[in-house]
Amino acid sequence: MTRFRRSNDIEVSISPEFDKEYNPGEAPDHPGIYRCGGCGCEVVAEASKPLPSENHPRHSPAQGRVRWRLAVAAQKEPH
């Protein structure tokens, strides 16, 4: 589970980008923290770089297929 210390560092979003699921090896559209829907493993991912494969360490076959979903989106602040 993703944790944070200061609530003013995070804002809630209803954007559909948080609902999209990615398969192992797919490149996400947005940078951020992605969580596996089967085992809960979290990884930091860059946009356009592949997400981890089906055999990431915490995932077992009993947890179903690996599916990555955006948990926390990273965004650049305008200067």
Image (tube, rainbow, N blue to C red):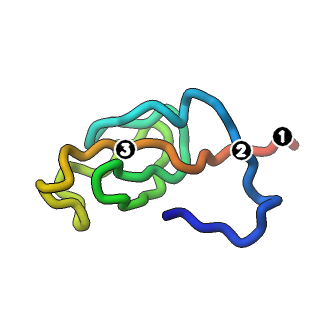
Which residue is more in the foreground, 9 or 53? 9
First along the sequence among labels 3 and 1: 3
Q: CA distance from mark 3 to mark 1?
A: 28 Å
Tell me the element at label 2. loop
- Which residue type carries mark 1? Pro
Circle count: 3
Tell me the element at label 1. loop
In the displayed orientation, state which residue is furthest to the top: 16
Q: Which residue is mark 2?
A: 12
Which residue is more in the foreground, 61 or 57? 61
Q: Residues within 10 Å of mark 2 (few under 14, many from 20)?
A: few
Q: Quadrant of the C terminus?
A: top right
Quarter of the image where one finds residue 43? bottom left
Which residue appears at 23% of the width and 50% of the height? Answer: 53
Q: CA distance from mark 2 to mark 1?
A: 19 Å
- Which residue type carries mark 3? Trp
Q: Residues within 10 Å of mark 1 (few under 14, many from 20)?
A: few
In the displayed orientation, state which residue is furthest to the front: 62
Q: CA distance from mark 2 to mark 3?
A: 19 Å
Which residue appears at 68% of the width and 44% of the height? Answer: 75
In the displayed orientation, state which residue is furthest to the left: 61
Q: Are marks 2 and 1 in contact (CB under 8 Å)?
A: no
Q: Residues within 10 Å of mark 3 (few under 14, many from 20)?
A: many
Which residue appears at 37% of the width and 59% of the height? Answer: 40
- Residue 49 position within the rendered picture, expressed as x and y whole percent measured from the top left: 40, 42
Q: Is residue 15 above or below residue 74?
A: above
Which dot marks residue 68? Answer: 3
Which residue appears at 49% of the width and 33% of the height? Answer: 19
First along the sequence among labels 2 and 3: 2
Q: Are marks 3 and 1 in contact (CB under 8 Å)?
A: no
Q: Which residue is mark 1?
A: 78
Left or right, 50 with respect to 2, comes to left
